[in-house]
Amino acid sequence: MTEQRDLLSRAREWLGKDATPPTTARDPVNQPMIRRWAEAMGDANPLWHDPEVRAAAGFKGAVAPPAMLEVWTMAPFRVGGRQEDESMAVLELFDQAGFTGVVATNIEQEYVRYLEEGDIVSYKAIVSDISDVKQTGLGTGHFVTINYTFTDQTGEVVGTMLFRVLKFRPPVQAAAPEKAEQAEKKFPHPRPGITHDTAFFWEGLKQRKLLIQSFNGRLVHPPVPACPETGSLEWTTVEASGRGTIHSFVVMHHPQLPCFKYPLPVVLVELEEGVRIVANMIDTAIEDVAIGKAVTLDFVEVEPDYVLPAFRLA
């Protein structure tokens, strides 16, 4: 308990201080990045794409979606992780004390104005709160709250963000092989919530078919009740060829569920039909998963009458 109080005392010395050094975006707000972000998010708002719409709204150049506020100042991707000056010392205190688990609990953003082409975004992040020890479903931990203030090249505030994470001590479970097998039986594979609108997709998987909704030739996935463009309720299905490329991916390590094997590569695949689907990679080494690689569809029968799509390298 004394050790716990000492940790909390040292962590709270960071209250009111910079969580990270003040950071300025490497690039100004620009149309190519806006376009790519909007395409990835499926955001077709003409304000981000159409010069005439922007001009009618009083903007001279490109306008960024408000949700891109934090995107401009993100640290560069590095295979080995963040550099020392990009990490948060206050969180490392908890890592060193065994609170190595981390999960974002909530993010609240406020937008003061649209970011426009040429704006150069900076932020300052201040540690605003560290909770007493909490007992959570993930384990014992502390909530750490950080307040971000985003400014432009003139110092004008363009937005704010509250970012809260839980730093927790993962429970130690050294299950014997036979106990691990019992755990897998005790915790069945999670199943989707199947509705009238999605039933066709799951029935298709049982038949080893990947079916995509077609609204008069406009393909949509995941399944929706009505065409997002026209509002039409009339649709048919198209069977996907199963060929595609990796558009993006993550490798899951935590939290771990007994019914999955970790590390678990999860990919966002761009099918050759033009829609994207999320699925697990199978029979592939983690280091071989990469953006742009060609993949082919396979099917995994998790349980009787429960089939999931999966992908392997082509």
Image: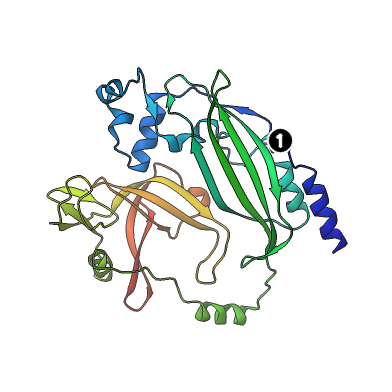
* Residue 300 in the image: above or below residue 55: below
* Residue 24 in the image: above or below residue 143: above
Q: Front-most of 299 and 123?
A: 123
Is residue 154 at all visible to an observer of this figure?
yes
Quadrant of residue 202 within the rendered picture: bottom left
Residue 77 % position (x, y) = 55, 37
- Left/right of residue 146 with respect to residue 276 in the rendered view: right
Is residue 87 at all visible to an observer of this figure?
no
Residue 79 % position (x, y) = 58, 41
Residue position marked by numbered label 1 in the rendering = 18
Residue 83 % position (x, y) = 67, 36
* Residue 205 in the image: above or below residue 156: below
- Left/right of residue 121 with respect to residue 145 in the rendered view: left
Which quadrant would the N terminus be assigned to in this image? bottom right
SS under mark 1? loop
Q: Residues within 10 Å of mark 1 (few under 14, many from 20)?
A: some
Q: In percent of the image, x 56 and y 78: which residue is there? A: 183
Q: Front-most of 211 and 46?
A: 46
- Left/right of residue 165 with respect to residue 189 in the rendered view: right
What is the three-letter code of the residue carrying label 1? Asp
Q: In percent of the image, x 67 and y 72: which residue is there? A: 173
Q: In percent of the image, x 45 and y 72: which residue is there? A: 189
Q: In percent of the image, x 73 and y 45: which residue is there? A: 90
Quadrant of residue 311 within the rendered picture: bottom left
